[in-house]
Amino acid sequence: MQLTGNQVHQNQVDINEQRQNASFRTTDGEKRVVLILLGVGILSLLIATFFDRNVTQAVMNQNSIFGNIFQNYADQGAQVVAFVSAEVIAWYIWRRINDQGLRYIMTGAALLLAFNQLLSLLQDALSYTFSMLNNLSKGIPMGVANNTAAVQNYPEILRWLLAFVAMIILSAIFANWFSKISDADVNYLIVVAVVGIATVFVAQLMIGDMKALWGRFRPYEMTTVSGQTMSEFTPWYHMNGINGHNSFPSGHTMSGWLFLYLALFVPRRHVTTQKKMVIFGLAMGILTAMSRVRIGAHWLSDVTVSSILVGLLIFAASRLIGAHFVENAEQQS
């Protein structure tokens, strides 16, 4: 059988990617960046060990616009990664499965998972937004809005309507994208999607379990007993046990850093887009962490430990996939 020009080119692309994966290693540049970020994290934790209360007392403001924006809309990193992963899986199935019945069933199931993530995303965003607006109407600090968990204080029909419209638009975009990319890109993306779902699951499980076990009071939960402020304060290394309080580590910060994982969904030859997504992911992680301290929802140590743990988890996921956050442009030409 004689191969066409396109088939020969595609085979060469596959061979090149196999060679790259076979020789994949962490670059010196990546090692430097990881060590720098880890060093900043350790320094931040050292400062927090001695000055957690001082930092909070100096910067806390529940009326902070910066803090409220990130409280309302940066808590969705986990859902965004899960949504993108589900969409990739759905259109991978649509492209790969030949049996029509099975194709529709499996694609539909993956799209339902994606839709569920949209509903969850909107639950958080709408709950925080409506709580903030309610606080403003009562003349109380707008950042008091449900720092612990989302509640249903919005029209449920609004959430479903927004999710339905977004699902149609975004699914159409993903379907169109998958109809144009190469088989090599499809094979790469399905790995990123599966690892992405696992990364979100591990991050949520890890942070959630630690929150329960540590039982740490949040800054805004501090009370005054016998004239002493912050009487419920405990250092980050002190485990209180399960008591209904869950400041340590920060869940919002976890979600903020998970936006960095989106850079791995960019096909490996699109280096410029990879750089932009890495910058976006780093900015979301850092700014979300800062906003949580600013609004009084977390201590500096809460956001620092969450940043270190989730950052290392995402880096480990990239090694498992065999992808650099920003590929060498010369290798991709």
Image (tube, rainbow, N blue to C red):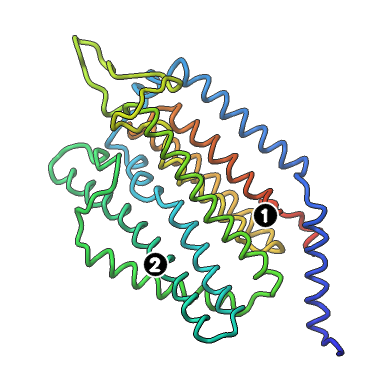
**As displayed, is residue 4 above or below residue 86?**
below
Helix, strand, or loop for circle 2? helix
Residue receiving disc 2:
115
Residue 86 appears left or right of 37: left
Residue 224 appears left or right of 26: left
- Closer to the camera in the image, 2 or 159: 2
Q: Which disc, if any, is residue 237?
A: none
What is the residue that sits farthest to the right in this orientation? 2
Helix, strand, or loop for circle 1? helix
- Closer to the camera in the image, 39 or 232: 232
User: What's the residue type where badge 1 is placed?
Assistant: Ile
Task: Identify the residue at image location x=31%, y=31%.
Answer: 245
Q: Residues within 10 Å of mark 2 (few under 14, many from 20)?
A: many
**Rendering quarter of residue 116:** bottom left
Q: Residues within 10 Å of mark 1 (few under 14, many from 20)?
A: many
Residue 40 appears left or right of 216: right
Residue 209 appears left or right of 5: left
Quarter holding the N terminus is bottom right
Residue receiving disc 1:
321
Task: Identify the residue at image location x=27%, y=39%.
Answer: 143
Give the mark nearer the N terminus: 1 vs 2.
2
Task: Identify the residue at image location x=53%, y=41%.
Answer: 310
In the rendered image, residue 279, in percent from the top left (x then y), is placed at 58, 49
User: What's the residue type where badge 2 is placed?
Assistant: Phe
Task: Identify the residue at image location x=56%, y=75%.
Answer: 93
In the rendered image, residue 237, in percent from the top left (x then y), is placed at 46, 21
**Rendering quarter of residue 208:** top left
- Closer to the camera in the image, 68 or 30: 30
